[in-house]
Image (spheres, rainbow, N blue to C red):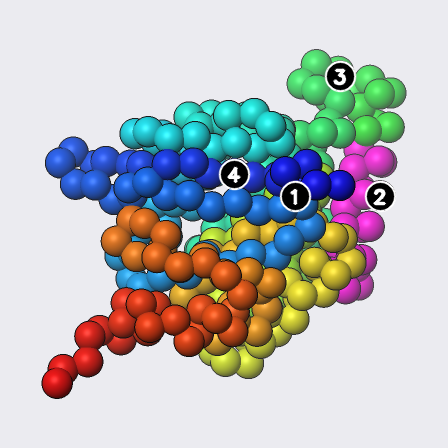
Amino acid sequence: MSSADRTLLKVEDLSKNFGGVRALSGLDLSLDEGELVGLIGPNGSGKTTAFNLLTGVLKPSGGKIIFRGHDVAGNSPETNARLGMARTFQNIRLFRELPVIDNVAVGLHMRHGSGFLPTVLKLPSAHRSERLIRKKALEVLHTLNMRDRAHELVSNLPYGDQRKVEFARALATEPSLLLLDEPTAGMNPHETAEVAETIRHLHRETGLTILLVEHDMKMVMGLCERVNVIHQGQILAHGYPEAIQQNPRVIEAYLGRRKV
């Protein structure tokens, strides 16, 4: 299979203006099927804007977002989710007073729910659908080693396990691309290491294509196969982690120009 045939996501000349301010300008990047790729950059570099454009939260001012061969630029998040794009959020957004399994089931309803009318009328098809959803929810939790916590309230879980539940809910939508938005935000080094291992395990077990937007450079370098560095709304550098760490332009963007 050629490289072009394996391309799942391709971003071409993507731009975003907020009034007179250009947040992104000519952004290009691509992901092949099965890759785990990082997107990093200093604060204010445009990472969050790029992520929100890819997932449909924001509409681009120009450029293309080609996902599975179709231009999805300007699509709603719901449309992109149905096409196979799932995301997590920097701030965990779970139903904290519901059990873990119910949170995961929310993601499954998009593809396996029986619909409004059968559910309201309590038709046999609705009961069959709910049984299937519960079964699949347990399978997803098993992938993340969380099956034994399926019936615990989310609010009773430690922060790291809550993040796993959010991963599970995203997986439940049966995506072909998973976008992780700063999953270690607010975590201590031990929690960060646990989340990194969860992502590594998830990628190894499912072969899912993952784009990781993250501020923790050490985590990204130890986890991702390729890394894109964004600075002032453009891709500054891209390549293997070893090369990125030694790139003078990347070092300058993060640390500033050394004074003579």
Q: Is residue 114 above or below residue 80?
A: above
* Mark 4 or mark 2, earlier in chain: 4
Cα separation between marks 4 and 3: 39 Å
Would you call the spot at circle 2 few (<14 residues within 10 Å), some (14-19), or many (20 or more)?
Answer: few
**Residue of label 1:** 3
Q: Residue 72: where, in percent of width, then height?
A: 50, 27
Residue 10: mark: 4
Cα separation between marks 4 and 1: 12 Å
**Residue of label 2:** 135
**Residue of label 3:** 118
Q: Is residue 50 left or right of residue 140?
A: left
Question: The residue under label 2 is which amino acid type?
Answer: Lys
Magenta run includes residue 27: no
Would you call the spot at circle 3 few (<14 residues within 10 Å), some (14-19), or many (20 or more)?
Answer: some
Label total for image = 4
Q: Residue 185: where, in percent of width, then height?
A: 44, 65
Q: Bounds of the magenta span?
A: 130-149
* Mark 2 or mark 3, earlier in chain: 3
Question: The residue under label 4 is which amino acid type?
Answer: Lys
Q: Which circle, 4 or 1, is nearer the viewer?
A: 1
Would you call the spot at circle 1 few (<14 residues within 10 Å), some (14-19), or many (20 or more)?
Answer: few
Q: Which circle, 1 or 3, is nearer the viewer?
A: 1
Q: Is residue 185 left or right of residue 70?
A: left
* Mark 4 or mark 3, earlier in chain: 4
Q: Residue 50: where, in percent of width, then height?
A: 38, 45
* Mark 1 or mark 2, earlier in chain: 1
Q: Secondary structure at mark 2?
A: helix
Question: The residue under label 3 is which amino acid type?
Answer: Pro
Q: Residue 5: where, in percent of width, then height?
A: 68, 36
Q: Which circle, 2 or 3, is nearer the viewer?
A: 2
Cα separation between marks 2 and 3: 20 Å
